[in-house]
Image: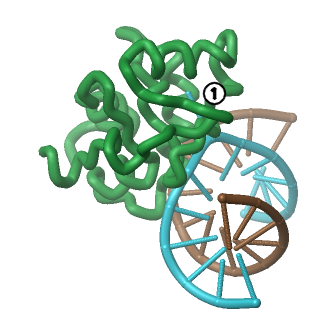
Chain colours: A green, B cyan, C brown
Amino acid sequence: MDQNFYEQVFELVRLIPKGRVTSYGAIAKSLGAGRASRMVGYAMRNAALAHPPIPAHRVVNSSGLLTGKFHFNPPELMVELLEAEGIVVKEDKVQQFKKVFWDPMIEL
DNA sequence: GCGCTGACTGGCA
DNA sequence: GTGCCAGCCAGCG
């Protein structure tokens, strides 16, 4: 780890292919901080202010639930972006989560 | 230095 | 599928 944890989180999130999503835990694990999933979420908080912009809408929790959509501006933006990429979202949950799930451990 | 909070997770009922 | 609990680590008052 020669870079900061946040930097790695941001980079990994940027690598998420369009139309795919991943979970905080998957990101944390791929960075070697399997139990630091909360830190990933905390990092995403900076994502909104980060430059260049981070596609934080592609990051959801292990259940495919859009737990962080409330932090968007406006909150419904997250769903809008996801659906715009072909991801089906209903009731703040990613449908066919297994299909659109992108595992950084496998893909990288 | 201490305690609470949080964009979480996995296990169990 | 849903709900509760304990573990984790960084930031903030």
Q: Mark 1 lies on which chain?
A: A
* Residue A29 sits in quarter: bottom left
Give the residue displayed 56% in from the left and 21% down from the top. Answer: A79
* Residue A59 sits in quarter: top left
Give the residue displayed 61% in from the left and 33% down from the top. Answer: A90
In the displayed structure, B11 sits above or below A36; it is below
Q: Is the residue marked by circle 1 packed among few (<14), some (14-19), or many (20+) residues within 10 Å?
A: some
Q: In this view, does A95 lie to the left or right of C2?
A: left
Give the residue displayed 21% in from the left and 53% down from the top. Answer: A105
Quadrant showing the C terminus of chain A: top left
Counting from the top left corner in percent of width and height, residue A68 is at 62, 33
Q: Mark 1 points at which residue?
A: A69
Q: Is residue A36 left or right of residue B5?
A: left
Q: In this view, does A89 lie to the left or right of A91?
A: left
What's under tag 1, amino acid-wise?
Lys
Counting from the top left corner in percent of width and height, residue C4 is at 84, 72
| Front-most of residues A106 and A64 | A64
The secondary element bearing badge 1 is classed as helix
